[in-house]
Image (tube, rainbow, N blue to C red):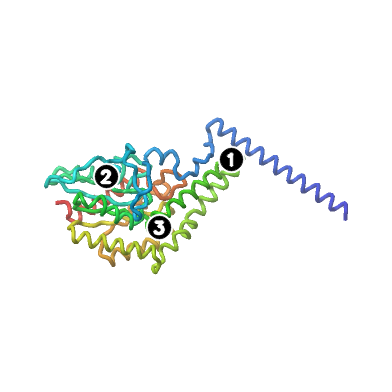
Amino acid sequence: MLAKIKTWSINAAIMLLSLLLFSVFIEGCVRGLQFLEVLPKLTEDSVSISGPALKKHNAKLIKSKNTVLALEYDKTDPAINSVGMRDREYTVDFSSDVSRVAVMGDSISFGLGVALEDSYAKQLESLLNAAGDRPKKYEVMNFGISGYSTESELEWFRVAAEQFAPDLVVVGYVMNDPIPTSALFGAVAEAMRKAREFGKLAEKSQVVAWVKMNWDRATTALNVMNNYEPFYDVEGEQWQGVVAAFSEFKRLSVDQDFQLLVVVFPMLFNFDDYPFAPHKSQVLAMLEDVGIEYIDLLPAYSRAHRAEDFRILSDDATHPNELGHRIAAQEIDLFLRNSGWLH
């Protein structure tokens, strides 16, 4: 019996030592290929929600005195104008041959990660003004602010946008819009903590970090869905807040005589078996009940592209790149031409 135990122990030790040596060999190979720049080196930025690609086209957020807004852009940031928009300066008064479009929304409408001219607001402006037979000049004003919920967007419209008397208001809707803006602080802090932990892990082992990164990517959609589920409870406070905000947007559109259009952006997960289909259906049904016209971008996005084709960062399934913004602008332009709004 003792001989068998001794033999088993020796075999187990040999196996563990072999696995250890194999792991060291693989780690050495990976780091060698990284040194030769054949493979990218994994760091905190590899999974950061504010990696270099997003930092390049961003602006500084500060706490707002308005509790509904919770956040505003710092007007001293060179990317932000005197109103608090990522846009050029506008005057309240404008000539009768100008038609104004106010784009409301969160970081997608802001154009996080893409140049201002590549945001869907500015691409739409270019498309609207490209046709020489239109009697008016179109100004598309970008009021998007990162982290805003639908309720914050409504408040921001009242605070900043309605003074410019827009003829059309486009609200960019994202699946996380029922989440209160004030909850952004905690979510960002948690994401930054996880990125720091990943960075420490990557310093110890690039192989283990690679395994963890890919496992997290594979399970991200499920985790996000679970996180969003409470906010889509039809009886819940957050969802009722969305319904109330859009109902008020609709009322304002009648009172102030502007057209209202909601553009629903998809999360950048598997378009063939879209995991957020129930949430999207709930949103579209609500918009129909309230009487608001909308564009569902999922069909246009999925027509010739995979979800991953739209990602700025491989781990960011929210913010579309320039291609995603271009398709959004084209779909809005097409809708407006077909609806007869361009006159």
Q: Residues within 10 Å of mark 2 (few under 14, many from 20)?
A: some
> Left or right of 22: which side holds 155?
left
Report if residue 217 is visible in the image. yes
The residue pinned by badge 1 equals: 206
Q: Earlier in the sequence, mark 1 or mark 2?
A: 2
> Toward the viewer: 229 or 329?
229
Q: Nearer the viewer, mark 2 or mark 3?
A: 2
| Element under disc 1 | helix
Q: Judge whether 88 appears above or below 328 on screen.
A: above
Q: Amino acid at mark 3?
A: Ile
Q: Residues within 10 Å of mark 3 (few under 14, many from 20)?
A: many
Indicate the position of residue 243 as horizontal and vertical percent values.
32, 64
In contact (CB < 8 Å): disc 3 and disc 1: no
The residue pinned by badge 3 equals: 179
Indicate the position of residue 197 as horizontal and vertical percent values.
56, 45
Residue at x 45% of width, y 45% of height: 49
The residue pinned by badge 2 equals: 83
Q: Nearer the viewer, mark 3 or mark 1?
A: 3
Q: Earlier in the sequence, mark 3 or mark 1?
A: 3
Q: Amino acid at mark 2?
A: Val
Q: Place residue 266 in its image quadrant.
A: bottom left
> Toward the viewer: 12 or 89?
89
